[in-house]
Image (cartoon, rainbow, N blue to C red):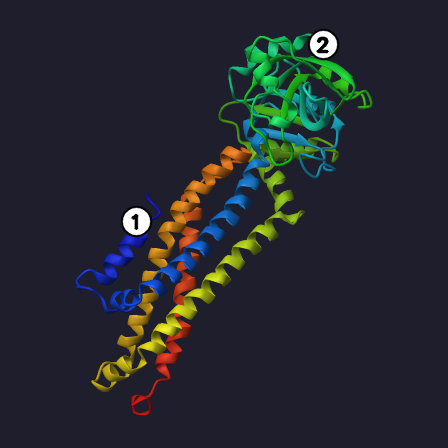
Amino acid sequence: MSPLQPLLRVLRSLWGGRGIPLAWLLLTRQPVRLAVALAGISFAGILMFMQLGFRDGLFDASVTIHRLFDTDLVLISPRSSSSVSMAGFPRRRLVQAMADPQVAGITPVHWNLLLWRNPKNLSTRSILALGFEPTDPLFTDPSLASKATVLNQRGRVLFDQQSRAEFGPVAEWFKAGRTVESEISGMRVRVAGLVSLGTSFGADGNLLTSSETFLGLMPNTPPGSIEVGLIRLKPGSDPAAVISRLKTSLPDDVTVLTKQGFIDFEQNYWRTSTSIGFIFTLGAGMGFVVGCVIVYQVLYSDVSDHLPEYATLMAMGYPLLTLLGVVAREGLLLAAFGYLPAYAAGQGLYALVRSATQLPVAMDTTRAVTVFTMILVMCMGSASLAMRRLADADPAEIF
């Protein structure tokens, strides 16, 4: 369902049997004032769209790799705080999990940020490296199995072609048939293939390698230590029951999570342990406040300018509630027509951000409805404040 459909239903219910409403005539009587008001509301809407879009996009980007894992359950160390700070735990815990009758298979994964040297300009930049046994399932993408066979040779890596350009023209050189070699933590490696994973908030690039090569890149890694353990269950298994049994049978040096729990673990870190969520939510709140001020000034000025006309209608017997409804409809019209350009601009800016940063920033129904609700509350709240000027008016004093 389009996010504009609820708006259209509201407008039809309010003006279904009317001709040209008085509220519309009052707003369009001064086109410049109306244009300024709509521009201010649209600006506030765009600001809210961008702030909330950046916030949600960064949270979604933080779990790009997490979503790709071919797993039902995940083992991590309780000392791990996020993808940029993964602690190790004994690999034998993953082997012990195989004792559960509903466990079908496991994949031990090494996970760490390493220094990649740009093969063109020799600058270094942190890249996320994942080490695994090439014969083990890792991602849900079935094409990875055939590509992973090249990792059996020591010193070979698969490079993520969606990595940022700062890592060098690796994908372009490889597709052109050139031999692409570089250094990771001082060790020479060769790019043996390309994968498409996507950048995350914690890592601007990714590469895959075998466990043997990974341990060569990280010689100080304790023997038998891994950072992530993937557990695949048999069809029809109850993940909650398996987690309960594993928590009972395994020592407390591991934490057992579902795949969604692993995703939530990462997102909760960026949401609660950093200032990202607060900053972008505050930015959206500032847009809301700016819009409130603009709409209030417009409606208050409109009521003040037409106070004699309103007083005349009151003296003729029109109830105050009817006149207050006129101001309320003005607020609703401003919300509706201010939201439309904000929505269109938000779509365009989201596309621009995706192209420039590769962040998964996209319009969704929830955010579209949220911003419209904020704009509606902003306009109707401002209209309510402007109504006080009309409610306090006394026809005898005005004339």
* Picture residue at 50% right of the left edge, 45% below the top: 53
Could you tell me which secondary element the residue under label 2 belongs to? loop
Visible in this render: residue 363?
no
**Residue 355 horizontal/vertical position (percent):** 50, 33
| The C terminus lies in quadrant | bottom left
Residue 174's place in the image compared with 387, above or below, is above
Going by the numbered disc 2, the residue's amino acid type is Arg
Residue at image mark 1 = 5
In primary-sequence order, the first of circles 2 and 1 is 1
| The N terminus lies in quadrant | top left
* Picture residue at 63% right of the left edge, 13% below the top: 134
Q: In the drawing, does residue 180 fall left or right of residue 358? A: right
Q: In the drawing, does residue 221 fall left or right of residue 256? A: right
Residue 257's place in the image compared with 277, above or below, is above
Residue 93's place in the image compared with 85, above or below, is above
* Picture residue at 33% right of the left edge, 56% below the top: 337
Is 41 or 280 nearer to us in this picture? Answer: 41
Instruction: Tell me if mark 2 has few (under 14), some (14-19) or many (20+) residues whose alpha carbon lies within 10 angstroms of its own.
Output: some
Alpha-carbon span between mark 2 and mark 1: 58 Å
Going by the numbered disc 1, the residue's amino acid type is Gln
Q: In the drawing, does residue 237 fall left or right of residue 255? A: left
Could you tell me which secondary element the residue under label 1 belongs to? helix
* Picture residue at 61% right of the left edge, 9% below the top: 178
Instruction: Tell me if mark 1 has few (under 14), some (14-19) or many (20+) residues whose alpha carbon lies within 10 angstroms of its own.
Output: few
Q: In the drawing, does residue 170 fall left or right of residue 188? A: left
Visible in this render: residue 245?
yes
Q: Which mark is residue 154?
A: 2
Is 95 or 169 nearer to us in this picture? Answer: 169
